[in-house]
Amino acid sequence: MRLENVPTIRELLDQAPTKHNDKTFIKYVKDGMLTEKSFSKVRSDSLAFCRKLRNELPDRSHIAIISKTCYEYIVSVTGVLVGNNVAIPIAPDSTAKDVAEILNDADVTAVLYEAEFSDRLDRVKALCPKLSYTLCLGDTDEFEKIYTDYSDSSEFAALSDIEMDPDACALIIYTSGTTGDRKGVMLSSYALVCNIMYKPYSDIIVRNDVLFSVLPLYHIFCFVSDYLSPLRNGNELCLNGSMRDLFKNFLIFKPNQMRVVPLIAQSMLARIRAVQAKHPELSPREAAAQVTGGNLDMMLSGGAYLDPELCKAFDEMGIFLRQGYGMSEVSGKVTVPDLDSDIACVGRLMNFVDARVVGNEVQLDTPCRMIGYYKRPEETAAVFTEDGWVKTGDIGYVNDKRELFITGRLKNLIILSNGENVSPEGIENRYKAHKIVSEVMVYAEKDLIIAEVFPDEEYAKQKGITDIKSELEEITDRLNETALPSHTVARLIVRDTPLEKNSMGKIKRKISSRGDA
């Protein structure tokens, strides 16, 4: 399947000022001041940055962007893309070694970086012989000069000869993928934009209201949903900046909707419940308003399992919280939740996406599929079926309402020495039904199922539970009573620190070992 009339990123940028009446597009707080940028300002600044790069770098340069979400990040990545270059987003908290591995693998010759990355830059340069150009994104005065020196009235103005091939590689995003080591997912402009061209099942998903961006734009889900989608739909996009400022910025921006990971939703719920405890006269909605600014009524979650009980808690406050599903190999999104979808599903398949289950694995047919893994033909072949469907690596099923349910990961599947398969996610979800369990990870050592639990000490305190370990042991015993023999937890580890996570809030798993290993 191929969608017709999918615009390029340049066309989205050019159409936005007229289409959205040149209203405010981006808001953010910097140095204590609220700053607003219109659609035409974002366009002119992005094209100015494009002209600078075009003047200083060869065509089709591979350019890495290492930065937190900020206005300069948006201008930079847009300038890279509309100039027909290839953007490689990298998490700014990466080590110099990790960054160098990506730069060398992706044949990067230019790096745009935030000021905080400066302490690692020399080490990266020493490890990357192809790197010849660097530019710091942290100098606002320098960027203002770029916007002036490379404006549409400057000698560098002509961009009319740039023809964007919608099927050429526009972005390489590094991910663990579905088959193991970190690989560069090559995505075209067509794949990126067609991912936002779906027909929604509910108007709540595409309202032209205030969107609060709190997740990093260097993740594909956020880049597509928090930038390209508002660029097309006309949302006002508010940038959070540091997570330290999350609750302060809620009251400044008063957003209507946001994308989250479960950890953010959990921290919001804890803050709202603290308000409820202090002001019992307030309704759930009124208590939530004191934390979120009063307008928030939709949150879409991704990146990790979302407990349905968390959804129900926000339902009571008039805030729609549901999870979606996606993967980098298909440009971020596969499903979109709606008001009528099952609370336990991960959303409903977008109208141009099909799914099937082969050998317990969910496979996808979508026009938003990647070109392939950069310089990895064998790995690319492994992730596609012979008829072109994408192997997700996820265990699950689709019902007749096109609702997708994910029950585990093939790579996490515990295979015991007797041949039985155990999905650790299934056991973890049973633990998560108990509020004293804050985090849990299940794995196996020599055929013994082990559960590591980080308890919610605040909940235990509220309920008068003084012996948390004994409480968790009792929960484990009750779960074992109704579990299959192969799913019985043989050892419980109660942690005093949270489980290690990646930048999207996903728990880093331990590799299970078999008894015959």
Image (cartoon, rainbow, N blue to C red):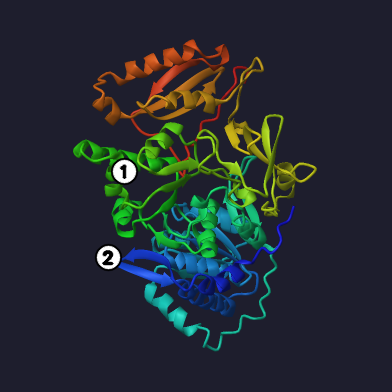
Coordinates of residue 86 in the picture (x, y in percent): 62, 64
**The disc labelled 1 sits on which kind of residue?**
Arg
Location of residue 336 with respect to 146 vertically, above or below: above
Q: How many marks?
A: 2
Q: Residue furthest toward the right?
A: 386
How far is disc 1 from disc 2 in space, using C-alphas? 29 Å
Helix, strand or loop at mark 1: helix
Q: Nearer the viewer, mark 1 or mark 2?
A: 1
Coordinates of residue 225 in the picture (x, y in percent): 52, 55
| Sequence order check, earlier mark of 1 and 2 | 2
- When asked about the image quadrant of residue 285, the answer is top left
Q: As rendered, which of 440 and 478 lies closer to the eye?
A: 478
Coordinates of residue 20 in the picture (x, y in percent): 50, 70
- When asked about the image quadrant of residue 275, the answer is top left
**The disc labelled 2 sits on which kind of residue?**
Gly
Q: As rendered, which of 16 and 476 lies closer to the eye?
A: 16
For residue 98, say whether it is visible.
no
Residue plotted at (68% across, 50% down) = 352
Q: As rendered, which of 181 and 296 lies closer to the eye?
A: 296
Helix, strand or loop at mark 2: loop
Residue on which the image places disc 1: 285
Residue on which the image places disc 2: 32
For residue 393, say whether it is visible.
yes
Q: Quadrant of the C terminus?
A: top right
